[in-house]
Amino acid sequence: MNITKPTHIAFLISAVVAILVAILFEKFSLIYVQPFTVFTILIIYFTEKTTPTSVLYIISQIIGLAGGILLILGLRNYLEAVSVLFSLFYIIYLRLMYVRNVMKKTEVTIYLYVIVISIPVLYIYYNVISIISSELAEAAVYFSFLMFFMLSYIFTALYYYLKDKNQPNLWMLIAAINLGFMNIIIGLNELYVYETIFTVIVVFCSLCIQFFVLKFMLDDTDEAIDF
């Protein structure tokens, strides 16, 4: 983030305002400020991109905003719609990663790493879903598709990074980790027990996701990262 650029300053201001609103006001108030974070992110993308415009990326931001607004209005009331919107959202992100990564032979150890790391993640999600399962009965099919595409996105981001440790894949992996954590908080906050601090965490994580996916889209380097 370059704080000398007006577009970056605008995003930081909108991000700080969103967090302050989440802390000081009712969750519904986020409807009035959340669109500005998406708007400023898209402005940064349009002004700084060095590759052809990605229509899929733009669509994903619009879908994410629509889904976010429904979450603010109440996940219980819009669980089916939210599941459909965010399933599309994750499908688009899967496509963006696929297009960015050149197909090449994968070592068996990469698959083993993904499987080993996925076990505790799946265990955590299993326990969270068990807690909120009574709220999911009427939209179980929609929610199942949502979980499938969400976990596919997270594990695919991990797979691509382990396969090719370049900077863009790192940005997408960080975004996926944020998203995985954020969705656990959303499930508990919306369908189990509401806490303002959970809403603040969700807003912060969503801002991190927006930022790191933007970095993924703008970063045209394919050099491996040395650790």
Image (cartoon, helix red, strand yellow):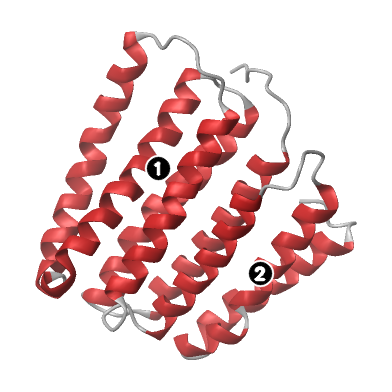
Residue holding disc 2:
37
Q: Residue at x 17, y 44 (%)?
A: 123
Tell me: 123 left or right of 58. left
Amino acid type at circle 2 is Thr
Asked whether 133 or 140 is in front, the reply is 140
Q: Secondary structure at mark 1?
A: helix
Residue 211: tell me if it is visible: no
Q: Residue at x 60, y 80 (%)?
A: 20
Q: CA distance from mark 2 to mark 1?
A: 23 Å
Tell me: 137 left or right of 222. left
CB contact under 8 Å: marks 2 and 1? no
Write down the quadrant of residue 12 in the picture: bottom right
Asked whether 47 or 32 is in front, the reply is 47
Residue 189 placement (x, y as % from top left): 30, 73
* 214 to 21, vertically: above or below: above
Amino acid type at circle 1 is Tyr
Residue 53 placement (x, y as % from top left): 74, 47
Q: Which mark is residue 153?
A: 1
* Viewer-side label of 2, 1: 1
Q: Secondary structure at mark 2?
A: helix
Q: Which mark is residue 14?
A: none
Residue 90 placement (x, y as % from top left): 43, 51
Q: Residues within 10 Å of mark 2 (few under 14, many from 20)?
A: many
Residue 52: tell me if it is visible: yes
Q: Residue at x 13, y 74 (%)?
A: 138
